Image (cartoon, grey):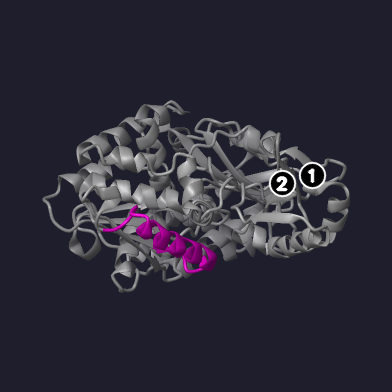
């Protein structure tokens, strides 16, 4: 009897003991004389259930989780190898788990289903169909499909992807580059890592299509240095893609060329900003460049360069395969397609949720997240990374789309949603935002470099009860100066969380550290 089991091998699952669970399952199968086909798939993004073990049955894959090595013997006795449901960890058919079933997965349709390094698995689920379609079009034809999709940058700026590609395409022929920003540094985010660890060929395909669109023959992935497993998996995927003709000098026999390699980041948050990233990629200290010129005109090594986030490029294979309109059919307004939302912080059911733009924060945090892990009331939520505003309950029913959030000073950013219960000190969170900038600023412009240091000092004086009225006014003026005068979004957005605390949680800021009002 052959039994097929799936145990994720991504960073999250391994951190929670997936390797030991796999070993325990192998031992249990050996003891019973079973022929075990153990597939190390990627996580489905249901992190509160990891390690999530699945067994193939005639009805579909049946899930169990979260599984510990110690639970394996009892699970086996309860019929795990046959898909039995007589155990508390039995979850039924994986696809029927509400957290997964209620999503709209376009970009993440394959994660958790395939062996990430299997080209057969990838092509069996329409992998490289977008590339094949792109090879039948000229560069403008590819860009027209991306334009029709309404795809915007998923890294935070939300700039229309097709406009950036069009600019590079229209530059004179010569050396051009595709650069993928995989320096995922926002708190509470992990979607880029899941792409690279769980479906790496999708990013390879997306970058190759981008190269065909603009006339670039070389691509670089600027990968966060804290992602060693993603680096290992992705480099192996690159080798297999080259060997199979999906990369190199003769793409699928077309005579067209595209080469791709991984470069490790420098461990600096500021290198998530595209011009700082390019400096770092060139071997320099990561410093923000003044614009113009835009990277699309003078980017890497002074040549026209497309710089896109992982999720932006990962959406491209679906768009070319199914057509731009199929992607644009999801979402609302100018926010088309789907958003990869990452639920983190004080949340009961943390993980990845992919939905069309337009769902509300409340629905996400309650229907998917299940409320706080602590069971205490939710007080605030930060969306868009450490530079995003802290949102009070009055803003939780706003639809998640770029324009709706911008209307009240929020940012969707990379889709990170970090939840806080009512024990959080929002004054301390405001201080953290300024302190984060003092540590991570590249130091090139005065408002960011000096303003953040002064911001920490002013907040400390407010929290110590020193001349609060005057210091609150000073803090407001300092925030305005940083927003208007900083060279890039690092300094320009650092005030957002501080301003949101001033507006929505002022008592937390003016209350002394000892806990009594000042």
Q: Residue furthest left?
A: 172
Q: Is residue 28 left or right of residue 389?
A: right
Left or right: where does residue 483 sit relative to residue 462? left
Q: Give me the C-alpha separation between circle 1 and circle 2.
A: 8 Å
Coordinates of residue 334 in the picture (x, y in percent):
39, 30
Residue 160 in view (yes/no): no
Crowd tier of the residue under label 2, counting other residues whose Cα lies within 10 Å: few below 14, some 14–19, many 20 or above: many
Start-end of magenta stretch: 222-248
* Residues at marks 1 and 2 touching, judged by CB atoms closer than 8 Å: yes
Looking at the image, residue 70 sits to the left or right of residue 430; the answer is: right
Q: Is residue 373 magenta?
A: no
- Front-most of residues 190 and 378: 190
* Image location of residue 181, percent across then percent down: 39, 57
Q: Check residue 82 in the rendering and tell me which mark sits there, or answer none.
A: 1
Residue 90 in view here: yes
> From the viewer's perspective, is the residue at label 1 or at label 2 nearer?
1
The residue depicted at 44 percent of the width and 33 percent of the height is: 337
- Circle 1 packing at 10 Å, graded few (<14), some (14-19), many (20+), is some
Badge 2 element: strand
Based on the picture, tell me whether residue 243 belongs to the magenta stretch: yes
Residue 43: image location, x then y, percent: 61, 51
Q: Which residue is mark 2?
A: 55
């Amino acid at each position: 009897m052959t039994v097929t089991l799936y145990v994720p091998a991504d960073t999250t699952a391994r951190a929670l003991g997936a390797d030991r669970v796999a070993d325990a399952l192998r031992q249990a199968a050996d003891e019973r004389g079973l022929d075990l086909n153990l597939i190390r798939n990627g996580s489905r993004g249901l992190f509160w259930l990891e390690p999530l073990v699945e067994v193939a049955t005639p009805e579909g894959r049946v899930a169990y989780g979260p599984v510990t090595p110690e639970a394996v013997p009892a699970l086996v006795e309860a019929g795990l190898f046959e898909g039995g449901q007589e155990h508390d960890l039995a979850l039924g058919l994986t696809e029927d788990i509400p957290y997964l079933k209620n999503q709209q997965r376009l970009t993440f349709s394959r994660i958790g289903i395939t062996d990430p390094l299997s080209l057969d698995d990838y092509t069996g689920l329409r992998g490289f169909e977008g590339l094949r379609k792109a090879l039948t079009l000229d560069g403008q034809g590819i860009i027209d499909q991306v334009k029709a999709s309404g795809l915007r940058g998923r890294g935070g700026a939300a700039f229309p992807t097709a406009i950036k590609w069009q600019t590079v395409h229209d530059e004179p022929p010569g050396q051009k580059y595709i650069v993928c920003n995989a320096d995922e540094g926002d708190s509470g985010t992990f979607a880029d890592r899941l792409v690279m660890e769980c479906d790496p060929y999708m990013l390879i395909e997306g970058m190759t299509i981008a190269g065909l669109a603009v006339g670039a023959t070389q691509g670089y992935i600027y990968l966060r240095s804290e992602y060693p497993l993603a680096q290992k998996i992705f480099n192996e995927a690159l080798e297999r893609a080259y060997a199979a003709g999906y990369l190199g000098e003769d793409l699928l026999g077309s005579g067209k060329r595209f080469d791709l390699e991984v470069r490790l980041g420098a461990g600096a948050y500021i290198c998530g900003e595209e011009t700082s990233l390019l400096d770092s990629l060139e071997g320099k200290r990561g410093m923000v460049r003044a614009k113009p010129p835009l990277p699309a005109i003078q980017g890497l090594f002074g040549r026209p360069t497309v710089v896109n986030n992982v999720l932006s490029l990962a959406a491209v294979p679906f768009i070319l395969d199914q057509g731009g309109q199929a992607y644009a059919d999801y979402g609302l307004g100018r926010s088309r397609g789907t958003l990869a939302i990452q639920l983190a912080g004080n949340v009961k059911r943390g993980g990845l949720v992919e939905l069309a733009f337009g769902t509300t924060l409340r629905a996400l945090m309650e229907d998917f997240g299940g409320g706080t892990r602590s069971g205490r009331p939710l007080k605030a939520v930060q969306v868009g990374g450490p530079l995003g505003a802290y949102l009070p309950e009055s803003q939780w029913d706003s639809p998640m789309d770029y324009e709706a959030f911008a209307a009240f000073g929020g940012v969707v950013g990379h889709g990170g949603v970090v939840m806080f219960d009512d024990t959080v000190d929002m004054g301390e969170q405001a201080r953290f935002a300024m302190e984060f900038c003092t540590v991570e600023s590249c130091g090139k412009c005065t408002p960011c470099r000096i303003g953040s240091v002064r911001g920490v000092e002013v907040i400390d004086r407010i929290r110590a009860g020193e001349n609060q009225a005057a210091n609150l006014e000073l803090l407001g003026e300092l925030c305005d100066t940083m927003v208007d005068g900083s060279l890039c979004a690092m300094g320009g957005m650092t005030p957002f969380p501080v301003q949101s605390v001033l507006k929505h949680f002022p008592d937390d800021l003016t209350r002394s550290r000892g806990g009594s009002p000042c």
